[in-house]
Image (cartoon, rainbow, N blue to C red):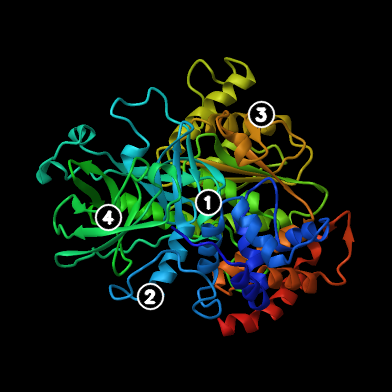
Amino acid sequence: MPEALSVQKLDALLATHRDLIDQAIKILHYASETPMSLEILELTEMGATVPRPLAEAIAAYLDGIAMTATFIGILRSLKQDVGEADTLPDMMQVDAASFDMEEMKAFCGKASAFRCRIVVNNQIAGSGVLISHRLVLTAWHVVNREIPWEEEPELVVIASNNVRYAAKLAGPYSDCHPDEWKKLVVPDDQLADHSDFVLLRLFEPVGYSLGHLAISDQPLVWNGEVACYLVHFPDGQDRGITQGKVAYGGGHRRYQHSVPTMPGSSGGAAFSNGFAFIGLHQGSVGDSKRLVPVANYMNDNAFRSTIGLDAAPKYLWSLDRSLNSHLIVGRRLFFEAVNAIIEGHKSINGVWIKRTQPEEAAAGQNFSLRLLEHFLALRDPGASVVRIDVPEDGSDLIDLVAARISAEGAATEARPGVRADETTAVAYERDRADALVSWMDQRDENLWLYVQSSSQELPRDVQLQLEQVIGRLERARRIKLVLSGLEGYHVPVATHQSLEAAEGMQMGLVVEYIEDFTRADLVDTVRVIDGDLELALTDADVEVLTDQVLLGVPTQFGRYSSKRIGEISEALATLLRPRTEAA
């Protein structure tokens, strides 16, 4: 069982690592509707009738929300060298003769942060582990039943900060053998296609803040039996890390272990005495406990590529990810939407970039095109981006699109019966658009159409053609759309104001408004820079840096002019370059 965090140890830590405690408290409440920080706790206590010392107030608060162990784990994941060895309590009583004590402390801290509970249809069904920014690994049988669900179950992951995050199936999985539902021993040669794992995708990058388990591509080998540590939630409860032994089963599909388990332990991550990841606890057969080694699927192409895509940048803070170029501020929704499209979101097939000041020049539109091209080069390297400038002179838009993608042989004429002199203009252009989109959708790679216009007045024929092409794209598999401008026009598809608003809705476009940025937008960019360059900035560092670069920059209604991004970029780069050299 994890120890309590003593007031004396916490007080000592406050004196040397106040900013670290503040960051850990904020992470505990990541994505919570009620924000919390060290400052809020301190102010609350100062307002009490009989104020307590800050360390005592923090210890009581953590104990009251049952998050002391998680708080300790987050502290370790943020920075392992937090003062003397006894500054933080041990996560569990251990035998120093069987492993390195300092490695155990570091492991317990990280494991406490990346472990999680899996909730299926409002019931805690098992355990899991964060393995990247948004991916959770658990056992397939945790989210399934012997009798399949009639409808896809509602999936929720409770992270170590005790926040519930909606989840969905991420793609790669392998079921368990049908006889394993009956707790029967299945011959090894029948288990090749039954590795009992599944990946769940969260809608928020929780692993970016809490940390995650990095899965090696090298199988673990040892002789005989070794100590085994299971990171799990028996009966859905936090009972620390449980110890037992595991027997090496090299070449086999299941390993035997002796760690005490309960319902809720399934999907828990097992580690060796060297703290290397072995696999996931599956269940019991008689008196024997079984785990499925990760070696069964660690190098599966779909498994690896899914993790790789999630590990790729989710947000560009500059075009070349260096401090020498223009900063990108306030475009998180754009990147989130493009990510969702790449990952196969069922309700989003494009982005509509709208200017809040349409009268301004098209420079911002061209920059958005560069953002898309650079981002896809990292996230979907095989994709093509084709820019389409909507003609303002009455030229044929459908012929223009075909020419821009070198669509030789593309049918842009309507079929007999719906030609220009045989039917209405709408039916005629709809048939032409159908033919063009069908041809484009036969390509082997994804195609992104970047359609832009600065005009507030398009010829009626061009507008009609544009509407028909966009309407046909809803059914396309390979074609994605980015609209830029066209603020005054109706588009015949659904529009969504956020990813959350799009869930379960009709296929459509996420709308992003281009406007002047806020201080929070710049803070967000600084945090992304910090994570990408591994600068180890504290929350206090981020706040101070933001204040320094915004000093003297005029603001109107809480927003800063996007025309000042150039000077802000240079100011921030000047402050951060010494830190990159130190890192």
Q: Quadrant of the N terminus?
A: bottom left
Label 1 residue SS: strand
Marks 1 and 4 close (CB-CB < 8 Å): no
Per the image, the residue denoted by label 1 is: 385
The image shows residue 537 at horizontal and vertical percentages of 63, 72
Per the image, the residue denoted by label 4 is: 294
Q: Is residue 75 left or right of residue 295?
A: right
Residue drawn at (57%, 47%), measured in percent from left and top?
163
Label 3 residue SS: helix
Per the image, the residue denoted by label 3 is: 464
Give the spatial CA distance, label 4 vs label 2: 26 Å
The image shows residue 513 at horizontal and vertical percentages of 73, 46
Per the image, the residue denoted by label 2 is: 101
Tag nearer the camera, 1 or 4: 4
Give the spatial CA distance, label 1 vs label 4: 38 Å
Q: Quadrant of the C terminus?
A: bottom right
279 over 389 or under it: above or below: below
Give the mark nearer the N terminus: 3 vs 4. Answer: 4
Disc 2 marks a residue whose amino acid type is Met
Q: Residues within 10 Å of mark 4 (few under 14, many from 20)?
A: many
Residue drawn at (54%, 75%), measured in percent from left and top?
87
Label 2 residue SS: helix
Give the spatial CA distance, label 1 vs label 3: 23 Å
Tag nearer the camera, 2 or 1: 2
